[in-house]
Image: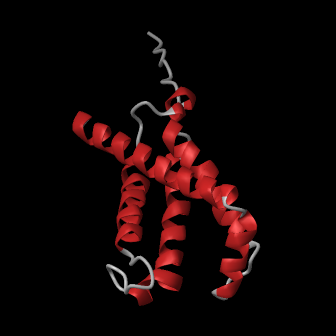
Amino acid sequence: MKNVEAGALILRVVLGITFFVHGLVKFQGGIENTVGWFASIGLPGGLAYAVAIVELVGGLALIIGLGSRVVSALLALLMIGATLKVKLAMGFLGNGQGAGYELDLALLAMAVFIVINGSKLLAVDQLFGKKKETVIQSA
């Protein structure tokens, strides 16, 4: 089980860094650009703020191991949405007009793995875990 936990830690941290950077870039590049792009593909522009915040805060939460399963589920939903709305039509490797959905699929698989298995190694969540109760038996 130690190997599984080490692997889950690697997936959690890499997934966290990837989403954190994607969220950060959305704000650094001017979130209004992302809002405009969302509107141009038929999504509510305000949704760009929610996506960027989930990526930024969720990525940081994954890096430190806080709420990993819940955060990973949210990120998996983002990847499903991005794949279905934008990337699927471009094909697996892209069509020359943009990237395909291969990276989205890999990120989705990583997120689903964490949803299913969790990631406890070096996770802040472990500080808040249940303490084992001492059972006192009477004679």
Up-down relation of residue 13 to residue 135 (above or below): below
Of residue 137 and residue 24, the one placed in the foreground of this image is 24
Up-down relation of residue 37 to residue 104 (above or below): below
**Could you tell me if residue 95 is visible in this image?**
yes
Quarter of the figure that contains the C terminus: top left
Q: Position of residue 79 (x, y in %)?
A: 49, 70
Q: Residue at x 35, y 42 (%)?
A: 10
On the image, which quarter does residue 33 sit in?
bottom right
Of residue 56 and residue 3, the one placed in the foreground of this image is 56
Q: Position of residue 42 (x, y in %)?
A: 67, 88
Of residue 52 and residue 27, the one placed in the foreground of this image is 27
On the image, which quarter does residue 108 sit in?
bottom left
Up-down relation of residue 15 to residue 43 (above or below): above
Left or right, 38 with respect to 113, comes to: right
Of residue 116 and residue 58, the one placed in the foreground of this image is 58
Up-down relation of residue 72 to residue 87 (above or below): above
Q: Residue at x 53, y 84 (%)?
A: 85
Quarter of the figure that contains the N terminus: top left
**Could you tell me if residue 47 is visible in this image?**
no
Q: Residue at x 71, y 83 (%)?
A: 39
Residue sitting at the far top: 139
Left or right, 7 with respect to 89, comes to: left
Q: Position of residue 97 (x, y in %)?
A: 44, 85
| Total number of numbered discs in the rendering | 0
Q: Position of residue 60 (x, y in %)?
A: 57, 44
Q: How is the image coloured?
A: secondary structure
